[in-house]
């Protein structure tokens, strides 16, 4: 009787997870397997697709354009992600302090940029920062200056402004949710002991954010490693931006697949970038959880 009940429960559980399993297989597992299959072939003018084994991977690791895009994304991540997360954390702490008027309105306003589609956000910032039109164009005319946020040396900084504007609110909500989970009794006990606001932040609130900080760092790394929309759209809006077809790995894979007709090489690039992203995210997770558990 107990075995029949266990089997019945098992069948019910499988029935509940079956829709997710089917969608997960069709939208993730199958595309990965197909990309792995494509990466073993090379497109040639004569003979069509030719099986080359791991030659695409060997070529990729010696491709200076690929590594140029990778290092650019790494530099972007090392600068933009800390700035964005510190800003998001500061906003979450300010909202949780209960000293701001209109906290609900501010919370919704800060999160609102995340709801704007990335393409619309890029177009908006492109018009805003462009020197031919928008804010900087007007400032240059009024002050007689020649400031251009989209020169080859400053385009990555401008993209960082766009990404920070779009995703700070999302990370702020994660931090804010973690702060709301802290029992209010801890604050009351700290107040009775004479702790000031800064001491409460340092001793209670910041330690409560360690777990959510690991999550936001992982999400941010995955997002920056997949950067595509901004460098794809900006060259059509501004001249001399310095954005090339290999500006980021995702942009390079796109041009290889849809402009250069090198689907096999693009598939190999996509799989290598996925492996790099997983490795970095896993290292951050292991290190972050280890530090959180040791404190």
Image (cartoon, helix red, strand yellow):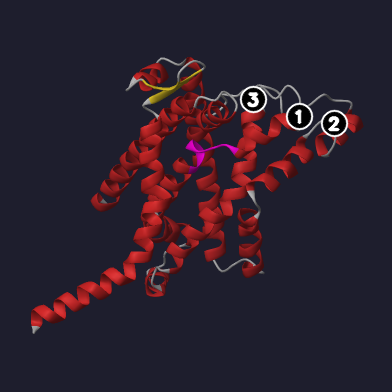
Find residue 158 and report its image quarter: top right
Q: Is residue 290 left or right of residue 263?
A: left
**Badge nearest the viewer, 2 or 3:** 3
Q: Is residue 178 above or below residue 168?
A: below
Out of 213 and 227, give the one closest to the viewer.
227
Q: Which residues are magenta?
A: 223-228
Label 3 element class = loop
Q: Are marks 1 and 2 in contact (CB under 8 Å)?
A: yes
Q: Residue 56 or 120: which is nearer the viewer?
A: 56
Q: Which residue is mark 2?
A: 132
Give the residue at mark 3: 243
- For label 1, count other residues whose C-alpha is less than 10 Å away and answer few (under 14), some (14-19) or many (20+): some
Position of residue 175 measured from the top left corner of the image (x, y, whole percent)? 47, 58
Asked if residue 225 is among those painted magenta in the image, a careful observer would answer yes
Residue farthest bottom in this picture: 1
Query: Is 81 within the magenta?
Result: no
Q: Position of residue 211 (x, y in %)?
A: 36, 55
Secondary structure beneath dot 1 equals loop
Name the N-terminal-most of marks 1 and 2: 2
Q: Describe the element under mark 2 as helix, strand or loop.
A: loop
- For the point 9% across and 78% down, the residue is 3
Q: Position of residue 64 (x, y in %)?
A: 47, 15
Q: Quadrant of the N terminus?
A: bottom left
Quadrant assignment, res 277: top left
Whole-angstrom CA distance, mark 1 to mark 2, is 9 Å
In the picture of the structure, the residue carrying the numbered disc 1 is 238
Q: Marks 2 and 3: CB-CB under 8 Å?
A: no
Residue 208 visible: no
Mark 3 nearby-residue class (10 Å; few <14, some 14–19, many ≥20): many
- Residue sitting nearer the eye, 19 or 47: 47
């Amino acid at each position: 009787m107990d075995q029949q009940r266990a089997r019945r429960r098992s069948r019910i559980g499988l029935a509940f997870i079956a829709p997710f399993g089917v969608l997960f297989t069709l939208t993730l597992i199958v595309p990965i397997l197909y990309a792995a299959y494509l990466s073993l072939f090379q497109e040639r003018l004569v003979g069509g697709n030719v099986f080359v084994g791991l030659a695409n991977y060997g070529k990729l690791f010696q491709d200076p354009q690929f590594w140029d895009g990778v290092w650019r994304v790494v530099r972007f991540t090392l600068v933009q992600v800390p700035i964005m997360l510190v800003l998001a954390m500061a906003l979450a702490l300010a909202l949780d302090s209960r000293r701001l008027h209109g906290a609900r309105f501010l919370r919704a306003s800060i999160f609102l940029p995340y709801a704007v589609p990335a393409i619309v956000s890029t177009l908006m910032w492109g018009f805003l920062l462009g020197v031919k039109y928008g804010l900087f164009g007007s400032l240059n005319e009024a002050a007689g200056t020649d400031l251009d946020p989209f020169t080859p040396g400053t385009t990555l900084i401008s993209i960082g402004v766009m990404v920070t504007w779009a995703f700070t609110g999302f990370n702020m909500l994660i931090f804010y949710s973690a702060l709301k989970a802290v029992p209010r009794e801890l604050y009351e006990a700290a107040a009775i002991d004479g702790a000031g606001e800064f001491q409460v932040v340092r001793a209670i609130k910041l330690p409560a954010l360690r777990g959510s900080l690991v999550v936001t760092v992982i999400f941010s790394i995955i997002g920056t490693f997949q950067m595509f929309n901004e460098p794809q759209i900006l060259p059509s809006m501004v001249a001399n931006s310095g954005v090339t077809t290999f500006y980021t790995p995702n942009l390079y894979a796109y041009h290889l697949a849809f402009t250069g007709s090198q689907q096999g090489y693009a598939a190999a690039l996509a799989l290598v970038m996925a492996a790099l992203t997983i490795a970095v995210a896993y290292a951050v997770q292991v290190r972050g959880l280890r530090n959180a558990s040791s404190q």
